[in-house]
């Protein structure tokens, strides 16, 4: 996908012509293409991009400026929603990345009985359970907020 695709998607309609073309692909391919496309945007910490410690950018701003991990997840959510993925089947997951010892965010999508993870740090769309170094803390799906409580040991 080219830079002109980024310009098209950054428009308010999120590039309806591009989204129409992507609609011809299978759900798995649409997830892969959206993940690959969004992951080409630059990762920029909020403090450097907006002068704020934390800022959740809208999708148009993300595709114009790049941003940090939760904005990658939000953009993927919005693009997949435009591609007929039901919002109730998607979650923005806030988590602890134990390898990097820092907070991170990803998008999970339930499709064909499997929870798939779209991550700004991973090129492929992978089953969520493969990221054993991630510890979910909170996830969001529409108006719902889910707290992830670790099992007692």
Image: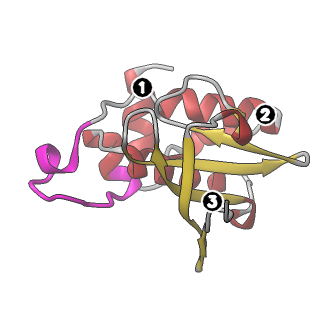
Q: Quadrant of residue 92?
A: bottom right
Q: What residue is drawn where x is 30% and y is 39%? A: 66
Percent x, y of residue 140: 57, 68
Q: Which residue is at the far right?
A: 113
Q: Mark 2 points at which residue?
A: 28
Is label 3 in contact with label 1 (beta carbons under 8 Å)?
no
Percent x, y of residue 145: 58, 76
Helix or strand or loop: what does disc 1 sit on? loop
| Residue range highlighted in magenta | 44-60
- Closer mark to the observer between disc 3 and disc 2: 3
Q: Measure how far apart labels 3 and 2 are at the Cα level.
A: 16 Å
Q: Quadrant of residue 89?
A: bottom right
- Residue 21 appearing in the image: no
Which of the labelled discs sits on residue 151, or is there none?
none
Q: Does the magenta stretch include residue 107?
A: no
Percent x, y of residue 68: 32, 44
Which of the labelled discs sits on residue 40, or is there none?
1
């Amino acid at each position: 996908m080219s830079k002109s695709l980024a310009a098209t998607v950054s428009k308010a309609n999120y590039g309806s012509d591009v989204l129409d073309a992507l609609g011809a692909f299978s759900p798995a391919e649409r997830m892969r293409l959206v993940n690959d496309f969004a992951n080409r945007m630059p990762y920029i910490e909020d403090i450097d991009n907006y002068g704020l410690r934390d800022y959740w950018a809208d999708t148009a701003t993300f595709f114009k400026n790049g941003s940090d991990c939760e904005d990658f997840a939000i953009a993927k959510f919005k693009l997949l929603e435009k591609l007929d993925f039901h919002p109730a089947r998607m979650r923005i997951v806030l988590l602890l990345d134990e390898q990097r010892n820092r907070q991170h965010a990803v998008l999970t999508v339930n499709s064909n009985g499997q929870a798939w993870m779209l991550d700004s740090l991973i090129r492929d769309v992978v089953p969520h359970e493969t990221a054993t170094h991630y510890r979910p803390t909170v996830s969001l799906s529409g108006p719902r907020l889910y707290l992830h409580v670790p099992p007692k040991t």
